[in-house]
Amino acid sequence: MQWYEGIMETAQTAVDYVGSVLDAGTFTDEARQVLSDFGAVMDSIADYLSREEGTLVEKCRRYALNAAHSADKTLAAHTPEEARQLFSYEVRPLVLDLRYQLDLEYNILRHPEREEEHLAETLAAFEAARKRPRRTDFKYRVSIIVPAYNKVEFSRCAIESLFRHTDFSRGDIELITINDGSSDETEAYFNSLPHTKKINLKHNVYNHLGWGIARHIAEGEYVVYFSNDAVATEHWLENLLAVHAAEQDVFWVVPTCNEECISNAQGIAVDYANTFEDMEKMQAFAARNNVSNPLLWEERAILMPFVSVVPNLFNVPEIRADYRYVMCDFEDDDFSAMLRRSGFRQILAKDTFVHHFGGATLNEVRTKRGNYKSIVSMRPVFRAKWQVDPWESRGHLTFLENFLKEQDIRDSHVHVLMIEPMFGEGLLAVRNYFRKLRQSVVIDAVVSDARYLSDVRSMADNIIHMDTLDHLTEEIHELYDIIIIAAPLNNLPITHILPFFHSCHEHLRPNGFVYALMRNYNSFEHTMESLPSQVPYLVYNTVMPLDGRRIYPVTRLIAALQERFTETAVQIGYIIEKHAFSDAESFAQSIYTVLRIPEASRDYLCQLLSGDVVLFCIRKV
């Protein structure tokens, strides 16, 4: 037995007793004494944890301090009803979450040999929750959760927009606010609002995906996480709920927003400024956009849920964010992985626009936690858990839609082969594209890396697992309109690259094309990454190769492909990724000088030096 288990068992008994007394409408002296003793125990737990080390220790310490503080507030309440609310919305949820986190810290995270089994059990719980009949005994149709950590001006804008564009009049929508240890006027502002369920914490704990504490008090059939730097718009809620009503196996539905304030290609171009002063212009833009249209519902492999609508499955303990992401980043990547691998679908509703100011709360937490080091710290957590990288595995395919538009496939039935789709972002992009055109598409997937089989299990129509891609012809017997190699060629188990392209080309229908990409390790960015620098390796780790990647001679490969398939059939593009280094122009000039490059050849070399990824499109003409 761990040191805390008996203590938390007793604390839970105390909480159950005090809760029963307060629910009866009284607050007896005996219940007061029990709650006072409970507060002292929480302080003792916090004191013990201050001398411990571990992933969740500091978070648990803050939970214990918050529980003690909320117990004191409950004791100081002016009426039994006020005491009951403070106890129900703060003390009890804090204790339940603290107990869960202590179990995770001491029984799982400190025993690496148990983590694989724990992950399997969690995935099984997600899948069981997806398959079971949905509860119908909810008090409300929707619970809206708004968490905040400082930035009260954003919270005020968010809440006012919710009251303006959400119909609370029917009494079937509840609002829950969480002040996560703010030091500004957030608590006073939330307390001035007319809703009942208010959580005010003294110590910031970072409330994971908005559900960590509120999961214990949300009583809606659907639960909305609404970031305090988002702004509600006309028809936002009914449009998002329409997705759940029409589609099966959906977990979260996320609206689109202004593209400069979100990554992952979730945003759209807007015609107003990202300022408080331009919010009326924003509302006019949203009113034109927010017309429910199922053709604009995109299934995604990963979503960043700045606003999300999810079914209330919180009575399943495992349906929660992974608390080991203690510094914000990669938590949504992790939850998306859990959803993909348990068969849940994730929908980006581009028929619903909600403004996003862009990371006001998370940036506040990131700054407090140590000057934006959370990316460096949290990326390895994902890798250790899933054994793949969260960024390199997405399978996003740049410019693919441009090639699809050029293809103009008029056949109502489209057949696509996707080779190594990884997380499946590109695979779903193809499915979304043809869905929007009302064309049916069959997608076969070839997977050589078994770590990704679970990701595409519910995305592809047929899956072929191959240890090597050298024998592709022996495994596929169809002709395809499109063949897409979603992973960089550098990473794939291919012994002979030209015969591989020939095999793909032979399996194309007339006018079909092969799409492929590879990392260009000759580019300026990748060259600089390979030199000693101040850029953290844990963030930029695409440099050569600790895990079997290979460098292809780009110029020779292009020439060989053009010779085999003709220059007309082979299109080449260069993709410039977000750079961590500057002064590429001086670097290029130095190369010209050292190699004595003639003026006529400099444009091509400039493309080669600036292109971090080389894109190939080989058409069957």
Image (spheres, rainbow, N blue to C red):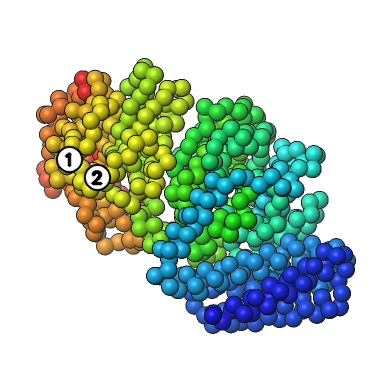
User: Does 615 sit left or right of 41 as displayed?
Assistant: left
User: Does 21 sit left or right of 369 as displayed?
Assistant: right
Label 1 residue SS: loop
Circles 2 and 1, Cβ within 8 Å, touching? The answer is: yes
User: Residue at horizontal 53%, vertical 63%?
Assistant: 323
- On the image, the x and y values in percent for residue 557 come to 15, 38
Judging by the rendered image, the residue that carries numbered circle 2 is 466
User: Extreme top residue here?
Assistant: 410
Image height check: is 79 above or below 478?
below
Image height check: is 154 above or below 348?
below
Q: CA distance from mark 2 to mark 1?
A: 8 Å
Q: Can residue 606 be seen?
A: no
For label 1, the crowd category at 10 Å Cα-Cα, with few meaning under 14, some 14 to 19 and many 20 or more, is some
The foreground one among 43 and 118 is 118
User: Residue at horizontal 52%, vertical 68%?
Assistant: 104
For label 2, the crowd category at 10 Å Cα-Cα, with few meaning under 14, some 14 to 19 and many 20 or more, is some
- On the image, the x and y values in percent for residue 531 come to 24, 59
Image mark for residue 471: 1
User: Does 299 sit left or right of 445 as displayed?
Assistant: right
